[in-house]
Amino acid sequence: MFTKDEVKIFKYWDGEKYRCVDPIEIQINLEGHEFGENLEELFKAVQAGDVKALKDVIDIGRVMFDLKEMEYDEENDKTTGTSSQGVISIMVDFISYMDDLKKNIDDMQTFVPSMDTQPKGVTLPTNASSECGSTSEGKCCDKPSQ
């Protein structure tokens, strides 16, 4: 149906391994989240120094991306999970990724014929950069990228 380059996947480090998620599913979940707040407004409040907004952004990020709080494992002398700064970084990266994806979809719509006139079996390429392409085995995130 789609080639590896056409499948758009958001890739991020969760503190233990790389994960790949469908960005559209995350976007849908963000818009329907119980906080019900506009993320753009929350980020503006964070930039203005609002600590409650900062906590909300971190909480939303942990839920949306299934991120565990960072913990220190004394036995192995390593940390696991994601720091609050890491959560914010993933949220910022995701918002930028979605902005680029939306921009490329908007650009593409000017050139794409309506679905009624498109020949069967033709897939339309997009220019949005993908952090990670999907594979038939679903193993795009098993190893950290080099």
Image (spheres, helix red, strand yellow):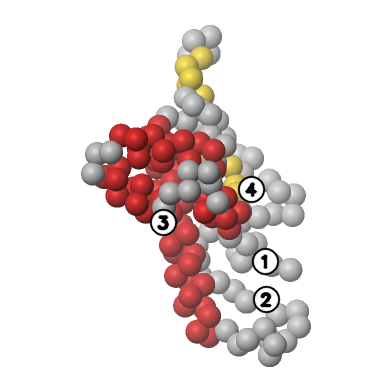
* Tag 2 and tag 4, C-beta contact below 8 Å: no
Mark 2 or 3: the one toward you: 3
The tag earlier along the polypeptide, 3 or 4, is 3
Question: How far apart are labels 2 and 3 at the CA level?
Answer: 25 Å
Question: Secondary structure under badge 4?
Answer: loop
Q: Residue at x 47, y 17 (%)?
A: 72
Q: Which residue bears the numbered disc 1?
A: 3
| Residue 140 numbered mark, or none | 4
Question: How far apart are labels 1 and 4 at the CA level?
Answer: 14 Å
Hey, which quadrant is residue 53 in on the image? Answer: top left
Number of residues whose C-alpha sits closer than 10 Å to that of mark 2, classed few (under 14), some (14–19) or many (20 or more): few
Q: Residue at x 50, y 36 (%)?
A: 62
Mark 3 or 1: the one toward you: 3
The tag earlier along the polypeptide, 2 or 4, is 2
Q: Amino acid at mark 3?
A: Ser
Number of residues whose C-alpha sits closer than 10 Å to that of mark 3, classed few (under 14), some (14–19) or many (20 or more): few
* Tag 2 and tag 1, C-beta contact below 8 Å: yes
Q: Which residue bears the numbered disc 3?
A: 96
Mark 3 or 4: the one toward you: 3
Counting from the top left corner in percent of width and height, residue 89 is at 40, 42
Relative to 86, residue 8 above or below = below
The tag earlier along the polypeptide, 2 or 3, is 3
Question: How far apart are labels 2 and 4 at the CA level?
Answer: 22 Å
Counting from the top left corner in percent of width and height, residue 2 is at 69, 67
Question: Secondary structure under badge 1?
Answer: loop
Q: Amino acid at mark 4?
A: Cys
Question: How far apart are labels 3 and 4 at the CA level?
Answer: 21 Å
The tag earlier along the polypeptide, 2 or 1, is 1
Q: Nearer the viewer, residue 36 or 13?
A: 36
* Tag 3 and tag 1, C-beta contact below 8 Å: no
